[in-house]
Amino acid sequence: GQQLNQSPQSMFIQEGEDVSMNCTSSSIFNTWLWYKQDPGEGPVLLIALYKAGELTSNGRLTAQFGITRKDSFLNISASIPSDVGIYFCAPTSGAGSYQLTFGKGTKLSVIP
Amino acid sequence: EAQVTQNPRYLITVTGKKLTVTCSQNMNHEYMSWYRQDPGLGLRQIYYSMNVEVTDKGDVPEGYKVSRKEKRNFPLILESPSPNQTSLYFCASSSQGRYEQYFGPGTRLTVT
């Protein structure tokens, strides 16, 4: 079966630092989604990537869809305390299949 | 406001007592899905629906039922809940042709 690895599992950073996390897969995907989840809440969509090589920004967040279609990364610049939470990658093969494969998540802690 | 709503948000019940968790979306989305989230296992899909009267099993369907009689509603039914169904449940929806799924706030279920 397909394997999806998300790293790092957790990270502690100082407020103002930049953050980088990534997901790699043994399978090719046609869409990569990135979500953030606050404790006890539902995942919230941050960025959607539809094309290999695509680089997309949403405020301080930047994500890229790897050229091999087997990986993606998410960067957060100038972190702030409200960035705390768990970040998930969720790729899908698309083409009519809406099933998402979720990474195990990266737990981000920001030290003020 | 575009949203996915779930009720109840919290539920404690006993083994074998049938329960229903409701899910409703106001975005006219065709696709709806149920997930459970457990520590160390991440988000796993239970059932999904591509449209009214069209449902299919996800990765962990055992012990659950769903129905899709109306486009906006997708209830999750546990006919005879067991303690291993204690979990955090999320409903999500997506528009046909788009793969971004929008999640509800979650239902925390405890079965004793």
Image: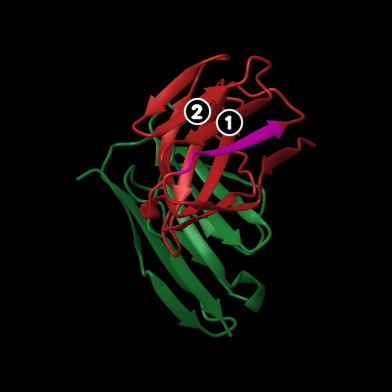
Query: Relative to B32, does residue A11 appear above or below in the rendering?
Result: below
In 3D space, how far apart are the residues under numbered discs 2 and 1 (Cα atoms)? Answer: 6 Å
Residue annotated with mark 1: A73
What chain does mark 1 sit on?
Answer: A
Across and down, in percent, residue A77 comes to 43, 36
Q: Secondary structure at mark 2?
A: strand
Across and down, in percent, residue B47 comes to 56, 49
Label 1 crowd (10 A; few <14 / some 14-19 / many >=20): many
The span picked out in magenta is: A17-24
| Quarter of the N terminus of chain A within the rendering | top right
For this orientation, the residue located farthest to the left is: B1
In red, which chain? A
| Residue closer to the observer: B87 or A22 | A22
In green, which chain? B
Asked if the residue at tag 1 contacts the one at tag 2, i.e. Cβ–Cβ closer than 8 Å, the answer is yes
Residue A47 in the figure: left or right of residue B70? right
Residue annotated with mark 2: A63
Q: Secondary structure at mark 1?
A: strand
Residue positioned 64% across, 14% down in the render: A67
Would residue B52 be visible to someone looking at this image? no
